[in-house]
């Protein structure tokens, strides 16, 4: 196992003017489980392929276990990768797929057999060893893809959206298994996803990418509570954070610095009040979505702004009713006109 | 519209295509004396005279042997070289890739007649006139572009992630190509080999121009030269035509699906 260090990585694909990765520096500690997350086109998969050696960076250096591997081809980096498409060898049996990496590394045949059996046992693949990939279900294929990475005991594991082709229930189970697997192996893992929920549950630390840059890195809870930018604030959490114009809501903006441009607050930190109670914003209920354990209430607060509130299941909000919104001062996030978070006294 | 109309159309088309073939088959077993009397394409007496004459008097096994050697050798070289050229064109990023591919296509569209003279001069200088290499090398001028073009299309259809996976598993680029890409391309390689063989087997102009006598003549040339000064031995010509069509017919019937796939490869995605 080894640490991975990215130093000022840049990537421009030939023929495309725009940079896919801009000046990304990131250190992934030995044994850490780090998630790269961002919308599509943010460069997260490209960054993972640069770590893997499948893409060459246009600038910067990649270090694995402290040694510079920027010019080392993928087959000599000793990393294992699980692909979104699984990329199982269609002409080889499950056994052949699992054994391939060991065979390429000239492991002796009895040792290959032992390690294939071990990995198959760990993933419940034993009855499938002689099947072809085309005879497997999606979930089984995914397991074989993980198994192929597992048999090798590599320096680090790379995952490129490995769960996105599974149905939601299986996805949840596999997520838990991956965490379990990580705590048993104590392996370095870099995991790419576009799903913020998956990122929150899987990452010991999360690096949020936007337009080829890292917006913020840190433990999931810290990013959720103290987003460094409007982008991070809106990316993490469902439903996403409400953001309103500071100039249009003076009651919320009171006491904030002059250059505060927008104010954000999470849907479940807003309290619905009657118009008579103390509140900062008034509005009209437009839509109520019951979820069972709670309900999502859409409140029109201004002709161009709608605020989403998560209300308790017992509340009986009626569409068309006038309501007050109360947002505790220490739960407000304040951003300047560039989307940077401004420090307020509460923080 | 009824369903009968298109069917009648199809039968008519098949009849138009098949009639000459049927005629050829029947005439090749009809005695010479009866070839020009009576209704055409009606089976009369059944004799194997023409075939006997073909192999005994004319030593027709010689052009058959020559054709087999030349077509097979051309196929082996075209596929062996074409696989790697196509792999590079489909998979590697290098300057001039698109230009190379269009050049390959351009070469294959040259009219053969336009390169016969220069090729003749080259082969004469090299002392290759009336030799097997003297046919295989010119054949590669059309067989290689054909193989490269077909195989490039096939390689492009294979997902690149499979090779990425092999490289992460520790295989070098070459090893990944040999272990993963080539086995998956096996059906495509077989199709390319079949098509190349058929083109080489049917080739006429080069074979006529670059051979001097029966020792190296191929089947199409030999048949064309049956015609004597005073008579045309139609029976034997048609028997020879049957022999020449046999490998083609067998290959096409055996590999029908693959050939169609090969001819339309890259035409649609999926």
Image (tube, coloured by chain):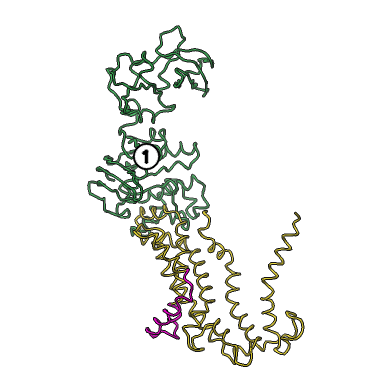
Chain colours: A green, B yellow
Residue at image point 43% right, 60% down:
B181
Asked if the magenta segment contains residue A175, the reply would be no
Where does the image place residue A196, in percent across and percent down from the top left? Answer: 40, 33
Q: Which residues are magenta?
A: B109-137
Q: Quadrant of residue B169?
A: bottom left
Q: Nearer the viewer, residue B209 or B157?
A: B209
- Judged left or right of residue B233, residue A345 is left
- Judged left or right of residue B126, residue B146 is right
The majority secondary structure of the magenta stretch comes to: helix
Where does the image place residue A57, in percent across and percent down from the top left? Answer: 29, 48
Q: Quadrant of residue A249?
A: top left
Residue at image point 33% right, 38% down:
A34
Q: Chain of mark 1?
A: A
Quarter of the image containing the C terminus of chain A? Answer: top left
Residue at image point 49% right, 37% down:
A168
Which residue is outermost to the top? A276
Residue pointed to by mark 1: A42
- Judged left or right of residue B36, residue B141 is left
Where does the image place residue A90, in percent across and percent down from the top left? Answer: 47, 55
Q: Is residue B125 above or below residue A278?
A: below
């Amino acid at each position: 196992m080894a640490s991975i260090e990215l130093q000022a990585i840049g990537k421009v694909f030939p023929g495309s003017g725009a940079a896919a990765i801009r000046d990304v520096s990131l250190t992934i500690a030995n044994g850490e489980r780090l998630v790269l997350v961002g919308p599509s086109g943010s460069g997260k998969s490209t960054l993972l392929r640069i770590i893997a050696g499948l893409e060459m960076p246009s600038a910067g250096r990649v270090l694995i276990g402290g040694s510079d591997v920027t010019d080392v081809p993928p087959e000599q980096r000793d990393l294992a990768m699980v692909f979104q498409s699984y990329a199982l060898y269609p002409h080889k049996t499950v056994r052949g797929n699992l054994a391939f990496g060991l065979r390429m590394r000239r492991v002796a045949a009895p040792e290959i057999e032992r390690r294939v059996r071990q990995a198959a046992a760990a993933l419940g693949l034993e009855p499938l060893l002689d099947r072809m990939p085309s005879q497997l279900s999606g979930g089984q294929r995914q397991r074989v893809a993980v198994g192929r990475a597992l048999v090798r005991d590599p320096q680090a594991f790379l995952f490129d959206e490995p769960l996105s082709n599974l149905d939601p229930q299986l996805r949840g189970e596999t997520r838990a298994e991956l965490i379990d697997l990580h705590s048993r192996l104590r392996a370095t893992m870099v995991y790419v996803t576009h799903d913020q929920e998956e990122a929150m549950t899987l990452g010991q630390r999360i690096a949020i990418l936007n337009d080829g840059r890292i917006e913020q890195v840190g433990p999931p809870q810290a990013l959720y509570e103290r987003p460094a930018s409007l982008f991070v604030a809106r990316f993490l959490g469902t439903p996403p954070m409400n953001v309103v114009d500071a100039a249009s809501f003076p009651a919320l903006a009171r006491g904030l610095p002059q250059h505060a441009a927008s104010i954000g607050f999470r849907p479940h930190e807003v309290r619905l009040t009657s118009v008579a109670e103390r509140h900062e914003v008034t509005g009209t209920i437009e839509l109520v979505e019951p979820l069972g354990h709670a309900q999502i209430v859409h409140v029109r607060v201004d002709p161009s702004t709608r605020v989403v509130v998560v209300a308790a299941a017992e509340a009986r909000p009626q569409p068309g009713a006038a309501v007050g919104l109360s947002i505790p001062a220490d739960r407000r996030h304040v951003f300047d006109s560039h989307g940077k978070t401004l420090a307020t006294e509460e923080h | 519209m009824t369903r009968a109309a298109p069917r009648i159309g199809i039968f008519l088309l098949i009849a138009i295509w098949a009639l000459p073939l049927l005629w050829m088959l029947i005439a090749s077993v009809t005695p010479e004396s009866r070839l020009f009397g009576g209704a055409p394409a009606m089976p009369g007496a059944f004799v194997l005279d023409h075939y006997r004459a073909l192999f005994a008097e004319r030593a027709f096994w010689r052009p058959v042997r020559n054709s087999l050697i030349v077509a097979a050798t051309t196929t082996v070289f075209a596929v062996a070289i074409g696989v790697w050229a196509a792999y590079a064109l489909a998979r590697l990023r290098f300057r001039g890739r698109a230009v190379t591919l269009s050049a390959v296509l351009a070469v294959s569209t040259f009219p053969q007649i336009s390169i016969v003279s220069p090729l003749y001069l080259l082969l004469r200088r090299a002392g290759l006139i009336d030799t097997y290499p003297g046919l295989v090398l010119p054949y590669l001028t059309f067989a290689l572009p054909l193989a490269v073009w077909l195989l490039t299309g096939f390689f492009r259809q294979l997902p690149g992630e499979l090779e990425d996976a092999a490289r992460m598993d520790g295989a070098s680029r070459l090893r990944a190509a040999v272990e993963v890409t080539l086995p998956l391309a096996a059906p495509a390689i077989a199709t390319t080999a079949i098509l190349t063989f058929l083109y080489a087997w049917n080739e006429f102009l080069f074979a006529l121009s670059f051979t001097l006598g029966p020792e190296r003549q191929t089947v199409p040339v030999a048949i064309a030269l049956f015609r004597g000064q005073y008579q045309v031995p139609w029976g034997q010509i048609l028997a020879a035509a049957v022999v020449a069509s046999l490998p083609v017919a067998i290959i096409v019937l055996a590999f029908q699906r693959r050939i169609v796939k090969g001819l339309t490869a890259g035409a649609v995605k999926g």
